[in-house]
Image (tube, helix red, strand yellow):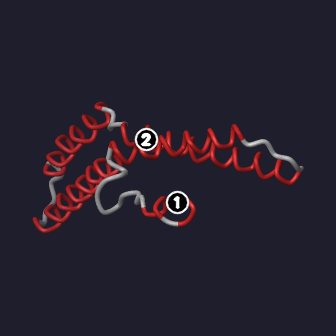
């Protein structure tokens, strides 16, 4: 992964170097150069944002809240005295399922570039970015 990031950084610097040494001769070339610089700057900004997001971790307080909430909430559902055991089992199972889904969501959101629901690098390998 480090070699891909290094290659991308090298190519971005090379593109910026080419644009800095380019001197447009016509107004049309001037407009093209300005738009190209703007779009390249946007691409570099978005790349920096993705790298920053990939390095972030879930705040410890949120993780403690999610797990602590699950540990407190599921046993509390046993205290709801229901006359029918099936209804109480359904209530406990529903709350446990909801808590489980919430914890899964927290862990999936903590790793946006991994797993089945990840951001793919495929668009960067196609079209003009592949060159």
Callout 1 secondary element: loop
How many labels, in total?
Answer: 2
Q: Residues within 10 Å of mark 1 (few under 14, many from 20)?
A: few
Task: Tell which tag, 1 or 2, sits nearer the viewer.
Answer: 1
Q: Which mark is residue 119?
A: none
Q: Residues within 10 Å of mark 2 (few under 14, many from 20)?
A: few
Q: Work out whether residue 4 or residue 106 is closer to the camera in this orientation and state it.
A: 4
In the rendered image, the residue lying farthest to the bottom is 86
Q: Is residue 51 above or below residue 104?
A: above
- Which residue is drawn at the image coordinates 54% and 43% (left, top)? 12
Q: Quadrant of residue 5?
A: top left
Callout 2 secondary element: helix
Which residue is label 2 attached to?
51
Q: Position of residue 39 (x, y in %)?
A: 66, 49
Q: Quadrant of residue 28?
A: bottom right
Q: Position of residue 67 (x, y in %)?
A: 21, 41
């Amino acid at each position: 992964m480090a070699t891909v990031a290094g290659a991308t950084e090298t190519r971005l610097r090379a593109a910026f170097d080419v644009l800095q040494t380019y001197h447009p001769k016509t107004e049309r070339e001037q407009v093209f150069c300005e738009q190209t610089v703007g779009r390249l700057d946007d691409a570099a900004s978005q790349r920096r944002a993705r790298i920053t997001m990939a390095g972030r971790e879930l705040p410890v307080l949120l993780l403690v809240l999610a797990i602590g909430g699950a540990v407190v909430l599921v046993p509390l559902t046993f205290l709801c005295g229901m006359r029918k055991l099936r209804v109480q089992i359904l209530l406990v199972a529903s709350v446990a399922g909801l808590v489980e889904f919430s914890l899964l969501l927290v862990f999936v959101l903590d790793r946006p570039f991994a797993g089945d629901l990840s951001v793919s690098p495929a668009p960067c390998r196609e079209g003009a970015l592949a060159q």
